[in-house]
Amino acid sequence: MDPGVAFGQVLRALRRDAGLSQEQLAFAAEIERNFVSLIERGVNQPSIRVIFKLAQALGLPPSKMIFLVEEKLESSA
Amino acid sequence: MDPGVAFGQVLRALRRDAGLSQEQLAFAAEIERNFVSLIERGVNQPSIRVIFKLAQALGLPPSKMIFLVEEKLESSA
């Protein structure tokens, strides 16, 4: 599985756990409204800056998000 | 400090610790030769996919790299 696809799935799960819509997360992370959807669907790859913005908006360290992506990749291997 | 700039500094330090030139790291990570230089100088932002490739080439988990970036950002705050 591509890391971008895995990141999108992790992002969607974390967003839902936080009870946020894509629009609410995009607003909180100060990124384009449809960019959350594009990332969640694995269409766009987030940059390091966007990863930090999303993590801050979701209230967890970016390294924790990346750790969850690593776990997803291992479990799908 | 911008996360992209912090990532570049962490990447440079890890690359030097590994005793690799920019060309050697780019080859090992299967990315463009000059892309390592652009990332290290904070000119380009790595995507999640490139972060995973660089971490693999350097032999550490991507989440560890991002943790080092978080530490650098905290120490520069």
Image (cartoon, coloured by chain):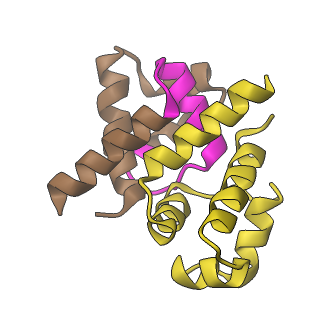
Chain colours: A yellow, B brown
Q: Determine if the magenta segment contains residue B6.
A: no
Q: Nearer the viewer, residue B38 or B57?
A: B57
Residue A27 vs B66, above or below: the answer is below
Q: At x 71% / y 77%, what residue is drawn?
A: A22
Q: Which secondary structure is most common in the magenta stretch? A: helix
Residue appearing at x 79%, y 28% in the figure? A76
**Region of the chain picked out in magenta, as a range:** B38-62
Residue B13 percent coordinates (x, y): 29, 31
In the rendered image, residue A64, in percent from the top left (x then y), is placed at 47, 45
Q: Quadrant of residue B54?
A: top right
Determine if the magenta segment contains residue B44: yes
Q: Position of residue A25 (x, y in %)?
A: 61, 77
Q: Nearer the viewer, residue A68 or B8?
A: A68
Residue B38 seen in this snapshot? no
Identify whether A43 is placed above or below A27. Answer: above
Front in this rendered view, residue B30 or A73? A73
Q: Residue at x 71, y 79 (%)?
A: A21
Please name the residue shown 64% across and 63% down the image. Answer: A17
**To which quarter of the image does residue B32 belong?**
top right
